[in-house]
Each structure stands twice: as structure tokens, then as C-alpha cells.
Image (cartoon, helix red, strand yellow):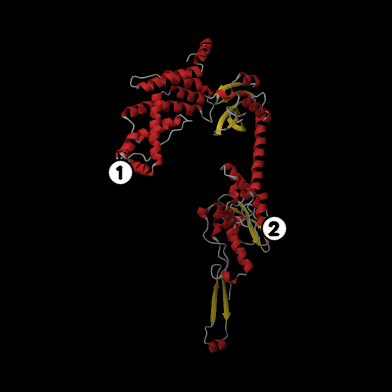
Amino acid sequence: MKRTGRRRSSVWDCFEQLGNFVRCMKCDARLKYCGGATSSMINHMSRHHPSTAPSDEDEKPVICTVQCVDDESAAAAGADIMQVAIMSPHVNAGARLSEREYGERKRLKRSSVWDIFVKVDEEVHCTMCDTKLKYRSSTTSMMYHIKNKHPDTMPGDGGSGATHAEVTELISRMIERDMLPVSVVGGDGFRELLAHTVHNYKVPSAADVTRLVEGHFHEKAEELVAQLANVEKLALTADLWTALPFQRYVTVSCSFITADWQGRSAVLQTHKLPSDGHAPADGVTGRLLSTVQIWGIAGKVTACVHNSARGISSPQAFIRGTWDYATCFATTLQVAVSDGLSEALVGVIVAAGKLVKHFNRSLLASEALETKQVQMCLPQHALIQSCKARWDTICDMFERLLEQRWAIKAVLSDRTITNRQEAQSLEIEDDCWQIIENFTPVLATLKWATTVISADTEVSISNIYPITFSLIQTHLVPRENDVEQVSEFKLKVQDSLRNHMEVGVFLSICASTGYTI
């Protein structure tokens, strides 16, 4: 019987043949055309032009298998004269494939490396450069070829994923970026995840990951040293902080401007300070000098900004250091706020903190507050507890109390939730509420000044005195509707800012230079 002809694939609507190559009429890409197969063209359309990709696969001829039986045998058997079996790539093909051929076809469908390679007999041909490779049921050699010769077209499928070394590198970078403990690699869940996702992967030990992290640290340190070598001037920041009552540290960082006028900052070193009381100024200065020598920036430091005048400023420190010292403006503002707090204001802050603490610790009260918030159509926000070390949290606490004032009163008035004695000890008097209402906008203005001056991406030193004069001459001027405690606070903060910022000296300099404020 005559063999049926090959049906033309619809992929040719998008390609034209140029000798041993085919050209995509959509993007002008050129592919190697081998053996009359259209697989590479179909894969190209599916990958790069999915909206116009042909729905058919590589067309194969439909073969009719005819079995002829003579008349005598047919009559004897009482069977049909002929039996016809239509063979198609989509019908019962898997049953007739050998195990190797079936595995190869399954792999071909799975890996996107076949977008670039075409199988010809026992070889694979690269459609990008016509390189021929031996094919032994593995795509590894093809992946290496694409990675080395055609990195821009590297397929992103999971058929041949990252190497084990690359996975280990990614684990170490994950620990660095997310600040995770190194011991995470020893977790059973983590090991189970990698065993499921990476075949035959051996999870590195904590010691191995530690070595990788330390190696990355040294690489970044060398990059920073090279960058600082090209900087003419920079400023240091000394941040003194406490981890435990008797463990004090100083973190030294630097700020500089690059050649393309981009502001940059980097942490250089963290030193542990002596635990016998307060660290002497000479000890802090000595650590600053050692940091400067280690990083090779001696002679480039113009100033050191610190957050503790008591910890750094001393005659010996100024003699040993080769730069000027300046107190952080945010620290100066915090000192000014502390100077302005009277006993009456402190009493209001303590009473407000006690009320917030009750709602944060009592499950019954917190659930009742949520119910009242829904009933009164108030925002479902939790109350905020102030922190002694951060005065701006007082502003946050007061703002939230004012927002939830009537819901709080409703909970305290409900005797099924709060008994009379407890309610009397927690209730804030109306006079105190008036102080909170009057005091909160002043604190919000000071908090705004701290936020502006603490910007990381912008140089803020030029804003210090304009902000100081704006506070002194406008925002901290007592008004007629201010309660007595708030007016007193404003005047005290004014005086503290004038003293710490040396406003008189600054005005004298401005007058001598003809500059007006």
C-alpha cells in the first residue's frame, strides 16, 4: 500500500529555510536545521513567542500498516480480509518504545536545553554554533556547553540545576543576608528540604559554612579597603552601646563621598570596652586610633561624631586624636528633652505607661479593647509601651492613647472586665488627658526633627542649625492655649538647646561674616 505523505508543520508559517539554517520571521533568530526535524523551531516559538506558538508538535508521517491475508486463509478463519492499524505519535507509542528511547523522550520533554540542541543519531548538534557532542542520555555536557559558549541563552529549567558547590555558596549567602545562625544547617527540617530539592546533596557542616562566611567577610573587607584608598576625606561615627549591664561596646563606622558624588557609609569595627564602670575617654580614643590604622585611613579623618560626650570628650582624648569631635544632634536633642521633663510630666508618663502595661499583660482587657474598637469604629491598633532609653516612644504612646481614649474608658468602666479598685488605679484624670493632648504635638515636632537629621541616604549636617533655630524660634515658643507644664517644658528645652548647640557662638560667627538667620 502506498505510504502517505508528510503533512507540513504550521511552524513553517513563522520560519523560512536558508540552506542548513532556518530564520525566525518574528525575531530574526537563526537556528540550525538538521534532518528535517522542526523540534528546535517549535521549542523556540514556545519559549520566545508563546502567543503565536504552533499547537502541533514535530510532524511525523502517518503510517498505515496493512496486513494482507489470502482468500483461503480468510475464508477458513472467518476473519476480515485486511486489518489496518493506524500508528501515530500520540497513540500507543510508549508501548513500542524501548526503555532507553522512552527515557530519552521523557528527558527531552523535561529539559529546556533541547531549545538549543537537536539530537541526530547518537549525537546532539548545537543550533547556535553547530557544535557536535556525544549524547548518552544526559544533558550535562550540553548544559556546560551552553554555560561556557552561550551564557546569554542559558536555559532556566530544573532539569540540570545548580551544582552542589553553588548550592553551598547560596546557603552561606542566605545566612549572611538574613542574619541567620550558622547552626541552621544542622536542622532536620533544613536537611529534609535540601534532600528533597537537590539530588545526592551533602549538607555542609556548621564549620564549613563558617569558613565560607569568614571568607566572604575578608573579601568585602578587601573591597572596602580598596574603596577607602581612593577617598580623600571621611568622617567617623562612634556609637557606644550596651548589650548587658556590664558589657559595653563601641561600633566605629565611616561616612564618605565617592568619586561620582554618592554618599556611602560602612561599619569598620566593633570593640568591647572594659567592664569596670564607665569606659575612660582615652580607652575609646585608643580604639578609634587602632581602627584608623587597621583600615589605612590615617590622615583622612576630619571629624568623629559620637553619642556620648562623657565617654569620649576629655583633654587627653583631644590630644591623642588628630580630628575634631562632635556630639550627635539626636543625642543632644534627647538630652534637651530629658532636661525639659518636669515631675508633673514624668508623673503623667508613668500613669500612661501603667495603663498601657495593664492592657498588654491582661488577655481579658486586650480582647475587650478589640471588641470596643469594633463597636466604636476605631482603628484596631494595639497600645504602645514607651521605653526609657528612647524619648520618642513617649510620643508614640501618647498618640495611640489619644486615638483609643474612648475605647479604653469603655473597658475600664465595664465591671465584668475591670473591677472598681483596679479601674480607679488605672484611670487617667481629665487634667492628665489635657496635658497629653497639649504635650503630644510638641513631642511630635521634636520627633520629626530627629527623623530628618537621622537620614541615612542624605548628608544632614547642613540641616542642624536651621532645625535648631526653627525649634527655638517657632515650635518651642509658649502659646496662650498651652498648659503650664507644657509651657515650662518648651522653655527648658530652648535653654538646653542653646547651651549644647552653642547658639551664642554661632550667632557671633554669623554676625562677623554678615550671615543672617
The residue positioned 62% from the left and 68% from the top of the image is 99
Disc 2 marks which amino acid?
Leu
Q: Which residue is mark 2?
A: 133
Q: Nearer the viewer, residue 496 or 61?
A: 496
The correct choice, above or below, for 467 with respect to 84 in the image is above
N-terminal-most mark, 2 or 1: 2
Residue 416's label in the rendered image is 1
The residue positioned 38% from the left and 35% from the top of the image is 355
**Circle 2 SS class:** strand
Which quadrant holds residue 159?
Answer: bottom right
Q: Nearer the viewer, residue 219 or 336?
A: 336
Q: Nearer the viewer, residue 87 or 368?
A: 368
| Residue 286 horizontal/vertical position (percent) | 65, 26
Distance CA(mark 2)–CA(mark 1): 82 Å
Q: Nearer the viewer, mark 2 or mark 1?
A: 1
Residue 406's label in the rendered image is none
| Residue 463 horizontal/vertical position (percent) | 50, 23
| Residue 93 horizontal/vertical position (percent) | 57, 69
The correct choice, above or below, for 421 with respect to 338 in the image is below
Which quadrant holds residue 181?
Answer: top right
**Circle 1 SS class:** loop
